[in-house]
Amino acid sequence: MSNLKIAIQKSGRLYDESLKLLKDCGISYNDGKDQLKVICDNFPLEIYFLRNSDIPQYVEDCVVDVAIIGSNLLEETEKKIDILEYLGFSKCRVSLAVPKDVETNDISFFQGRKIATSYPNTLSKFLAKNGIRADIHKISGSVEIAPNIGLAAGICDIVSSGSTLFKNGLREMQAILKSEAVLVANQALSEEKKAILDRLIFRIRAVLKAKQSKYILMNVPNEKIEQVSKILPVLKSPTVLPLAEEGWSSIHSVIDDNRFWEVIDELKQAGAQDILVIPIDKMVI
Ligand SMILES: Nc1ncnc2c1ncn2[C@@H]1O[C@H](COP(=O)(O)OP(=O)(O)OP(=O)(O)O)[C@@H](O)[C@H]1O
Ligand SMILES: O=P(O)(O)OC[C@H]1O[C@H](OP(=O)(O)OP(=O)(O)O)[C@H](O)[C@@H]1O
Ligand SMILES: [Mg+2]
């Protein structure tokens, strides 16, 4: 039986979270130093550690079957590969930025000017769509330095916290693309590989779903159970267990992480006490 081949970034922004995701999926391997390829012990998977910018080509050429990359790289490289799952980490945007003393937010500022970027294709598509003719200057890193050394009037690069822009005296003018890590696959997977991939995606979804949810439990006087239950968004219906103290019950449920702060006051007002919120490791629905 053949293994599914997955490429992940060798080092950089995506490396830690990509490996953590595989680990959370229960996949383990013998971690030899500086290995560029490892075979997993307990899942039919081979991991290839590659340069991020090379990965889309490897996937399209079927050198590997699947990969974890930033979705912005797909926009840039336009390879024939499919996004299977949004993974929720390495969130960032590709943005136009200018020296902070430039006052306008009108992108026609760039008309006839030079823009430094590592993402020339993404930028040229955006400029064409907006009718801006600018001179695109491709550099492969440290793009934020370009305006300071007189190389360009502005830049187009990845922004996350904005601190690199700030440290270089720049400000974000306009985001042109949002990005996050994605699982991608080539379009010619065998049935055997697809079956392994389905098992991997099943595990990834269980991990991602669990991250978005919390287990919540609280004590409630019996006469308030119905009222409290109505507030709780539940999978089926909440679990209600009697407490040793007569007239009281413990209600257990699962809640979306973002919803918790919205309903906490309502729960208290409805009579819930001693509310505990606990992380969930895996969630299979
Ligand atoms: N500051 C950031 N915050 C969040 N995500 C980021 C950030 N910078 C980059 N990313 C995402 O991580 C991906 C990899 O970026 P990284 O800088 O690690 O590698 P690279 O320099 O693009 O490529 P290579 O591995 O070929 O050197 C990017 O394509 C983007 O999707
Ligand atoms: O908005 P921030 O949180 O400051 O992040 C943005 C910076 O992160 C990335 O660089 P990285 O650190 O990956 O270095 P690189 O240019 O060598 O890839 C990107 O190219 C920006 O420079
Ligand atoms: Mg980078």
Image: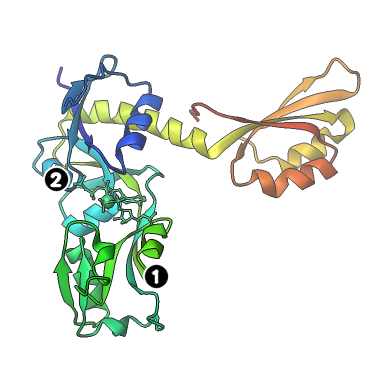
Picture layout, residue 265 above or below residue 276: below
**Percent x, y for residue 199?**
32, 26
Q: Which mark is residue 147?
A: none
Q: Which residue is mark 1?
A: 171
Q: Is residue 4 left or right of residue 169?
A: left
Residue ID at (10%, 36%)? 63
- Evaluate whether residue 236 shows in this view: no
- State whether label 1 is within 8 Å of ligand 2: no
**Percent x, y for residue 281?**
51, 26
Find out whether the residues at labels 2 and 1 contact each other: C-beta distance under 8 Å.
no
Say which quarter of the image contains residue 34.
top left
Quarter of the N terminus within the rendering: top left
- Identify the secondary structure beneath mark 1: strand
Q: Residues within 10 Å of mark 1 (few under 14, many from 20)?
A: many
Say which quarter of the image contains residue 97.
bottom left
Q: Is residue 192 left or right of residue 23?
A: left
Say which quarter of the image contains residue 181.
top left
- State whether label 2 is within 8 Å of ligand 1: yes
Q: Which residue is mark 2?
A: 54
- Identify the secondary structure beneath mark 2: helix
Residue ID at (16%, 28%)? 36
Query: In front of the other: label 2 or label 1?
Result: 1
Name the amino acid, label 1: Arg
Q: Residue reaching furthest front?
A: 149
**Percent x, y for residue 191?**
18, 29
- Closer to the N terminus: mark 2 or mark 1? 2
Disc 2/disc 1 C-alpha distance (Å): 30 Å
Total numbered badges shown on the rendered structure? 2
Name the amino acid, label 2: Asp
